[in-house]
Amino acid sequence: MIKKRKRKPYEVYALGQHICMSPHKARRIIDQIRGRSYEETLMILELMPYRACYPIFKLIYSATANASHNMGFNEVNLIISKAEVNEGTTVKKLKPQARGRGYPIKRSTCHITIVLKNIALYEEYKDPYLRNMRSIGYA
């Protein structure tokens, strides 16, 4: 049985599966952007010279679109709370070599998960005074 974990009301995520790149190369970029704000992350990804930046850029843009469209969050308040790279399937091919031999080629893929957190809502949920005031109707 697959257990689905519940998402917090101030988190939004985007998942990219079977991206054709090595997980090691993707982790190199993900480690640079984890914990940063949305705007800062976009600037970093645009200026980095690696091929892995483009799919990660698209995923972050997609997660932000999910946040603004589905939840109504503002882009200014979003930070990357969790970013992880997992190994995907490996595509195996045989390249013909001399004398009838074959040389195996392995194309690795990866799954990238980006979770954005709305820090404005997170602070309200954490502060019991504000939560109490909202439930009463004052704030």
Image (cartoon, rainbow, N blue to C red):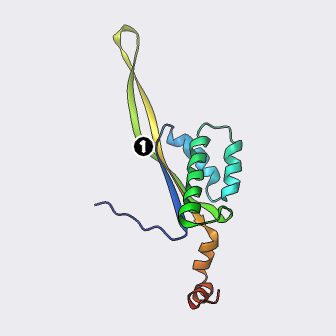
Give the residue furthest to the left. 1
Question: In which quadrant of the rendered view does residue 135 lie?
Answer: bottom right
Whether residue 59 sits left or right of residue 109 in the image: it is right
Q: Position of residue 134 (x, y in %)?
A: 59, 86
What residue is at 55 percent from the left and 69 percent from the top?
10
In the foreground, 48 or 54: 54
Circle 1 Cα neighbour tier, 10 Å, few/some/many (<14 / 14–19 / ≥20): some
Residue 40 left/right relative to 12? right
Could you say which is closer to the camera, residue 121 or residue 70? 70
Task: Please tell me whether mark 1 sits on a helix, a strand or a loop.
Answer: strand
Query: What x and y, as percent, mark residue 90?
Result: 40, 36
In the picture, the quarter occupied by the C terminus is bottom right
Q: Is residue 75 above or below residue 28?
A: below
Count numbered badges in the picture.
1
Q: Which residue is more in the foreground, 85 or 11?
A: 11
Q: Position of residue 4 (x, y in %)?
A: 37, 63
- Compared with residue 94, is residue 51 higher up or lower down, i.e. above or below? below
Within the image, what quadrant is residue 126 found in? Answer: bottom right
For disc 1, the marked residue is 88
**Residue type, label 1:** Gly
| Residue 31 shown left or right of residue 20 in the figure | right
Q: Residue at x 50, y 42 (%)?
A: 23
Would you place residue 124 above or below residue 48 in this image?
Answer: below
Most extreme residue toward the top is 99
